[in-house]
Amino acid sequence: MNDSKHSIITYCIRVVRKKRMLYALALLLFLLIAFYLSLPRALFRAPYATVVTDCNGNLLGARIADDGQWRFPPLDAVPEKFRICLLQFEDQYFYLHPGVNPVSMVRAMVQNVRQKRVVSGGSTLSMQTIRLYRNKPRTYFEKCIEMVLAVRLECRYSKKRILTLYASHAPFGGNVVGLEAAAWRYFGHPSAQLSWAEAATLAVLPNAPSMLHLSKNRELLLQKRDRLLKRLLDKGKVDSITYDAALMEPLPQEPQPLPQYAPHLVSHYYQTQRGAYTVSTIDKGVQTRVEALLERWNDELLRSDIRNIAAIVLDVESGQPLAYCGNVRYHQSGSGNQVDIIRAPRSTGSILKPFLYCALLQEGTILPHTLLPDIPINVNGFTPQNFNMQFEGAVPASQALARSLNIPSVQMLRMHGLPKFHSLLRKAGMTTIHKPAAHYGLSLILGGAEGTLWDITHIYRNMAKALLEKNPIPQSPFDPAAIWHTFEAIKEVNRPEEIDWRNIPSIQRVAWKTGTSYGFRDAWAVGVTPKYVVGVWVGNANGEGKPGLVGAKTAGPILFDILNLLPSSPWFAPPDLIEVEVCRQSGHLKGRFCPDVDILLTTPQGATSDPCPYHRLVTLTPDHRFRVYANDPNHTEVVTKSFFVLPPAWAWYYKQRHPLYEALPPFVSGSTAGDYVPMQFIYPSFGATISLPKQLDGSRGSVSFRLAHHDPEATIFWHLDEDYLCLTQDFHEVMITPQPGKHIMTVVDNQGYTLSVSFVITE
C-alpha cells in the first residue's frame, strides 16, 4: 500500500516538473519572440530632406524635410575622423560591448548617487540610437527598455550600421539633424571633408544640442571641443602639429546656406522623388560656368525687357544632362524666375523644321537640294509668310531649311502629310502633342504646337546618337543617312559670330537651328556636335512678346557661348550612302534633258525619287527667237534646245533673284502649242476660301488677284464669272470686292490662252 502511494506521489511530482518545464520553455519562447519583435523593420520613419548631387557627389542643392528639419537621407558610412572623435567622446568601448556597457552603467550610478543628481547616463551609442528612435521622456524604466533594445539592435545590425544610424539621426542644434546636414550647415562642405577641429565640434554637439550650439554657450562648446582634441592627442590619434592647428580653428559664426546649383532640377527631384538622395548626371563644373554665362546674358537682355533664359547641355553618348538651367536667378521674385522653362510647354516656332526635312529625305520624297516652291499660298485661309515677307519662287530644300523659310516648309508638310508628321513627332518623343493632327493644321511646322526644351533637345540628341552609331536607335524614328544630310544642311546656318568659320578648320562644326514663335514670345536655338547637344530658350515666362525676341539674335549667340565652354570634337563620319546623278539646277535626279549634272551621295530611298520635271526639250526656229510646235507642218527647219522651265508663278518670283533665268521664247505666229498654258495664278489657289473683313468705315474689304505669265509682254483680260473686268500689262494684279458665295475668275491672254480659278467669298 505504501509503495502504491509512493508511486503516485512520484508520478505527480514528475508531472508537475514537466509542466513547469513546459511553462518555462513557453515563457522563454515568448520572451525570445518578444525580443525578436521588439524592434520594427525600419527603425526611423522620419521624413528626409531631398538632396541632389552632381555626378561626382558634389552637393547641388537640397530641399528641407516635410517636418521642417534639415535631415539628410541616411549615410552609407561615417567618415573616419568623425568616427574617432565620436567614439572617444561618447563610447570608447563601442566595439567591445553587446549594446550595454555594465562598467559604464555602474560608474554612472555611483557618480549620480555621489552628486545627488544625474551627471552621467552611462549610455552606449547603441542605447543613444534607441533613444533617438523612441524619443520618450528619460526615466529609469525607459532606461531599462533602452538597454534591452540596444542589445536587440546589436543582434540585428553591424557596428558600422549602428554608427551610421546614430550619425544620421542625431540632433546637432536648431533644426539640423544628422551629420551630413550639420557638416553642410555649419562648415559648408560634406562630412567626408571635415577637419579634426570640425569633426570634434560635431562629435560633442549631440551630447546637449539644446544647450550647446553656435548662438548659445559658445565658450562651453569650445572648451568641450578642445578637451576632446586633447584626449585625441593623448590617445595618439593625432600628432602635436595637427592638435595645435586644430586648436586655432574658430567655431563657425552661424549656419551657412546650402549650395544652390541647378535649383530648378533640385525642385524637380523634390516634386518627383521627395526625401531621396539623388546622384544626378550634372557636372558641377559645366553647370556653374553655364549659370554664370546665362546671368551675364540676362543682364544684357534685361535692357530689352527680356527677362528669362533657360539652357540644357546633353551628353550625346548617354543622353543625360550635364548642365540644367531651368531659368536664371531662381531666388529673384516677380519675373517668373521660378518657372522651369526646360519642362514648360512653349510655342516651337521653326525648331521642328529639321525633323520634317529629315522625314522627307528618309522616304525619298525629296533629295537634299530639290527645288521647293516659295510663292504666296492660301490653304483654307491659312496664308503663311516668310520672316522677310518676300518670295523667291523656288528654293533648294537644304537652303530653305538653313534659312528657315516658312512657305517651303509648309509645302514640305503638305507633301509629307500632316497626320504622318504628327505621328512622327509623337514617336520621336514630343510629349506635349495631345490633340489630333487636324487641330494643329499646317501651322504645326511653324509653331502651331507647343513643345518643351527637354523633349526637343532630346530628339536632336537621339538623331546625333543614331548618326554616331550609323544605325537607327529605338528612341529615334530617323535613319542615319537622312540625319546626315539634315545636319549637313543646318551646319550651314549663318552663325552670329563675325568670322569666316567655314574656312577655319580648328573651329567646331555645329549643326544648329533657331526658332521664333508667333508674336516674338519664344526664341529657341539648338546646337548639335558629336559630343554634346545644347538647347537654349529666351523670352518671358509670362508669354509677353518683345520685338527683338528672335532666335538667331538672342538664343543663337548664347548657344555658341555655351558651346565655346565645351571641348570640341571631330565632325560626324558619314554613314553608308548611295551615289546618284542629280540635276544641278533642280536638285532632282537627272532627267533626260538635264544638261548639267552633279554626283550626290544620298539615302537609298532618294535613289528612287522623281527625275527632274523642269528641263524640257523645246523646238525652236533656227534663229532661236520663237518656239514652234514639234510637229508643225508649217515649220520644217527647226532646232531643239533644253530649257529649264519652272511653273509660271514660280518663275515670276524666281527670275527676280536669278537674272540668268532664261524664259521661254514666244510661239511663232500661227503655231499651236497643244495643251501648254503659259500662265498661272499666284493668288488665290484653286478652291480657296477667302474672308473679307469689314473696313474701319464699315465697308467690305477687297481681295487682290495676282497672275504670272511666261511672256513679260503679254496682255491679260480679266473676267469675274460672266462679267469682263479689265486688262493688265506688265504687272498682272487686280483688286475686286466680290459678293459672298462661289465665283470663277477667268483670264485670257493676247494669244488666246485661257485659265480659270474658282474660289469662295465669306463675310
Image (cartoon, grey):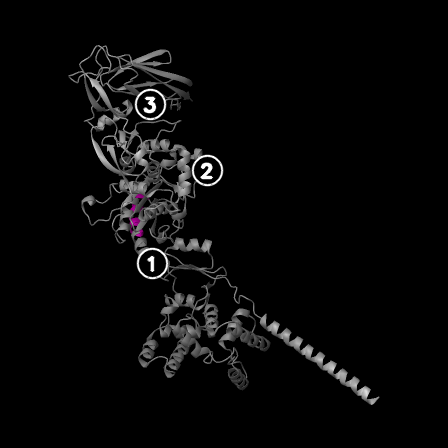
Identify residue type, mark 2: Lys
* Vertical arrangement, residue 123 with respect to residue 45, above or below: below
Relative to 369, is 223 above or below?
Answer: below
Pick whichever, 8 or 657, lies toward us: 8
Q: Secondary structure at mark 2?
A: loop
Label located before the other in sequence (2 or 3): 2
Q: Mark 2 and mark 3 in contact? Answer it, CB < 8 Å.
A: no
**2 or 1: tag closer to the N-terminus:** 1
- Residue annotated with mark 1: 284
Picture coordinates of residue 676, whole percent (x, y): 29, 17
Report the amino acid beneath label 3: Tyr
Q: Residue at x 31, y 53 (%)?
A: 290
Horizontally, is 382 left or right of 561 in the view? right
Residue 267: image quadrant is: bottom left
* Distance of label 2 from label 1 (alpha carbons): 39 Å
In the image, residue 350 sits, relative to residue 101, either above or below, namely above
Q: Which mark is residue 683?
A: 3
Locate residue 183: give its quadrant: bottom left
- Circle 1: residue type: Lys
Element at label 3: strand
Viewer-nearest residue: 579 or 205? 579
Q: Which residues are magenta?
A: 294-305
- Residue 295 in the image: x percent, y percent? 31, 52
